[in-house]
Image (cartoon, rainbow, N blue to C red):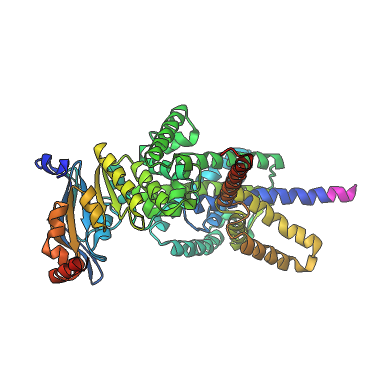
Amino acid sequence: MTPASGSTVASPPLLDVAAIAKHFGGVTAVSDLSMQVRTGSVAGLMGPNGAGKTTLVNLISGLLPSDSGTIRFAGVEIQRSPAYDIASQGIARTYQNVRLFSGMTVLEQVMAGCYVRRGASLWASFLGLPKARAAYKAVERHARELLERVQLSAQANLLAETLSYGEQRRVEIARALGTSPRLLLLDEPTAGMNVQESNEIGNLVHSLRDGGLTVLMVEHNVRLVKEFCDHVTVMNFGRLLATGTPAECIAHPDVQAAYFGNTADAERIRALR
Amino acid sequence: MQALGDFWRAYQSTVAFAIVNAFFALSTYAVLSAGILSFATVTYAAMGGFVGARLVLQSGLDPMLLLPAAAGAGALLAYIVALIFLRLESHWMALASLALILITRVVVINVPSVTGGVNGLSLPVKLPLFVLAILLAVAIAVFYRLSVSWFGIASRAVREDPAVASSIGIAPRRIQTIAFVISGAVGGLGGMLLALVLQFLSPDTYFVNIAFTMIAAVVLGGSYHWIGAIIGAAVFTALPVIAQAIVPHFQEVANGIVLLLIMIFLPRGLIDPRAIRLRRAAHGASADAARGAARIVEGKP
């Protein structure tokens, strides 16, 4: 149905997670999970609450160390790399609960996101060398372009914490884009948004993909997954439950059971509608 | 005329102490602005003070020429402290830095060849007040450049949320190590300036009293902007002097009351860029609303 799902089967995956595991004390958050994200696709990550989706995102972005397994990004193993190194290799992310820097304006947040692409050493920037000044101006222009992209140009000089929730989420996306990523991890980007706002996020994700970015998004909303994702991975209790096109996954009996209890319940709920 | 002269003399030394305290407050601010509460400035000050004083006595050179040595000694010590401290969680770091102050005093007493031990060290050299002022101006220029450079952006990000900072490619440890080294250089310099102002050093010169003043200065002056550290240092140097003049016997009480008032009514300190921005935004919004209302009244949407 979607253009990307058929055409790029042969290309190696941009992200290759193999048998990754993470335990917190006695609790298994992610266990023996493998998944791939193809270059230029929008991949969805679904699963009931507590399935381990956010933990997986934290493992990929390096915020948590994994217990075992490998994560390859563009062919390079990254599961032992620190988060800042993974970010500079080209993986950016947003957070389930918006985590913006307090006291910074919208533009400053995005500028901070551009840190790895600043084009001048800290020392040159401190001394205010002409080259560093020029690079700073270029970064600021780029940050303003990113704000335009998420439709927040008018809010550039406001404190980010004074914006609405939906706007703050878009600031976070712009900040993540500041690192010029090849893979963008979005952790529930539409949580708490209305239909129109979530559609805007979906369209933004599509326009980013069309610009060459690969996206992995944690998403609960079945409609959005169907509409905006090329490929879906479903998790439950830290394990892989199903993987395939959105339609295949949603129709999968195990997925139905995980979301609705069991197939019979699912049918009953459908009958009630 | 005599009274005026006395007043100026007292005033002059208060200004000198305010400038020295500004260096200590800036040293504390340097690490605090990267999210670290550390009292280790006292130790850097002792390092800079004793090394600087000893070099002045030994070489007979102009102390101005030896100020870089004091800053360098402080920076080197701070780098070593950073290697150890940055392995600790933030509250343990604060405690460890307090322990460091206690260790400093013991070390000072036990290396008399450098510090003069319990007898202390007298330093018969004086630095004119205008030199202190020029040095503070240089420090201000450095902190200004830091705040508007990429280091400033990165350290604010690390201070607000180290995990998020690292997920946008900022290495928190690296930024914090640089912050420690800056703190050490400024603290070491402040230590030598204190030696030159006091002209006498004892093991008690660099002790918890400095830690109290500098923390009060930086936290209550405003720990979100370097100006806060300088204003805080001025306030907390002048406050005891003023309180002694007005309420001689209740000086400590007056100090405490001012501290409490600031903590209750200005929890983010006297200088708070965030509050200033919020106020500006609110003014902008109400100005916009007023303009909109005017347009409606005039019948032009």
Q: In the image, is residue B24 part of the stretch drawn in magenta?
A: no
Question: Is residue B110 left or right of B14 when viewed as pictured?
Answer: left
Q: Quadrant of the C terminus of chain B?
A: top right
The image shows residue A81 at horizontal and vertical percentages of 26, 50
In this view, the residue in front, A243 or B5, is: A243
The reply to whether residue A253 is in sight is yes
Q: In the image, is residue B2 part of the stretch drawn in magenta?
A: yes
Range of magenta residues? B1-6
**Residue extending farthest front:** B299
Question: Is residue B143 left or right of B257 when viewed as pictured?
Answer: left
Quarter assignment of residue B127? top right
The image shows residue A109 at horizontal and vertical percentages of 43, 45
The image shows residue B159 at horizontal and vertical percentages of 46, 53
The reply to whether residue B49 is in sight is no
What residue lies at 60% left-to-right and 42% top-to-bottom? B296
The image shows residue B39 at horizontal and vertical percentages of 53, 59
Does residue B114 sit above or below A211 in this rendering? below
The secondary structure that dominates the magenta segment is helix
**Residue extending farthest right:** B1
**Residue extending farthest left:** A10
Does residue A260 sit above or below B177 in this rendering? below
